Amino acid sequence: MTNVAIVCHSGFGHAKAIAEAVAKGAGQVSGAKVNLIPVAEAEAREAELDAADAIIFGSPTYMGGISAEFAKFKDWTSKRWMARAWQNKLAAGFTVSASWGGDKQNTLYQLLTLASQHGMVWIGLGLPPGNNHSKGSIDDLNRTGASIGLMAQAHGDQGVEGIGASEFRTAELLGKRVAEAAQRWQAAPLAKAA
């Protein structure tokens, strides 16, 4: 059994919808158990995070970085850092904002840094960029062209219906990639030595 935890903050429902798509993708991997954990519940569900083989972090991008609620979770994780509880777990991340750019890469770097501080091993998106040539389309996978994680775009004046279908498909592929990597990682000597 592979345990994948997705810990996320969602202010307006967009990041939660992406998190659910990531969970759907991870759940497609045989033997994967997926726990979706809102950041507000993380402390109460600490044991689920500690038992996870992989943790996928998700936050909306607000003003060029993670949300205040995710930052509060990030600071709480220092207790797990002191215990080295997440050492050698796999990690990945996603973010969503209304703008195509929106400085989302800064948010992914914050998530990557958090994982690195914990001694985790980061899994990138693993998809080529979409929508970057004359025959491309907003319906392409990875339409924002991210590599270190998923950068989703959602119209700010709409709910989850403002998220493109390709974003959900890309999110599913991220979840599947992480769950498959976690299965392989479980057998690795470094993971067992942790």
Image: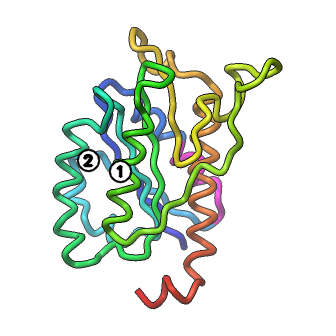
Q: Would you say 69 lies left or right of 101 here?
A: left
Q: Which residue has dot 1 on it?
A: 7
Q: Residue furthest right?
A: 135
Residue 8: give x, y in percent of width and height.
34, 44
Neighbours of disc 2 within 10 Å: few (<14), some (14-19), many (20+): many
Q: Which residue has dot 2 on it?
A: 39
65 is higher (above) or lower (below) than 123 = above
13 is higher (above) or lower (below) than 159 = below
Q: Would you say 34 lies left or right of 32 here?
A: left
- Residue 193 counted in the magenta span: no
88 is higher (above) or lower (below) than 145 = below
Q: Would you say 187 lies left or right of 120 here?
A: right
Say which amino acid is labelled 2: Val
The segment highlighted magenta reads 22-30
Q: Nearer the viewer, residue 103 or 78?
A: 103
Distance CA(mark 2)–CA(mark 1): 6 Å
Q: Indicate which disc residue 112 carries.
A: none
Residue 163: give x, y in percent of width and height.
52, 22
Q: Nearer the viewer, residue 24 or 71?
A: 71
96 is higher (above) or lower (below) than 51 = above
* Rendered residue at 53%/70% (across/down): 2
Q: Earlier in the sequence, mark 2 or mark 1?
A: 1
Residue 59 visible, this angle: yes
Q: How is the image coloured?
A: rainbow
Q: State the SS at label 2.
A: helix
Q: State the SS at label 1.
A: strand
Say which amino acid is labelled 1: Val
- Residue 29 counted in the magenta span: yes
* Rendered residue at 21%/51% (across/down): 73
Residue 156: give x, y in percent of width and height.
40, 14
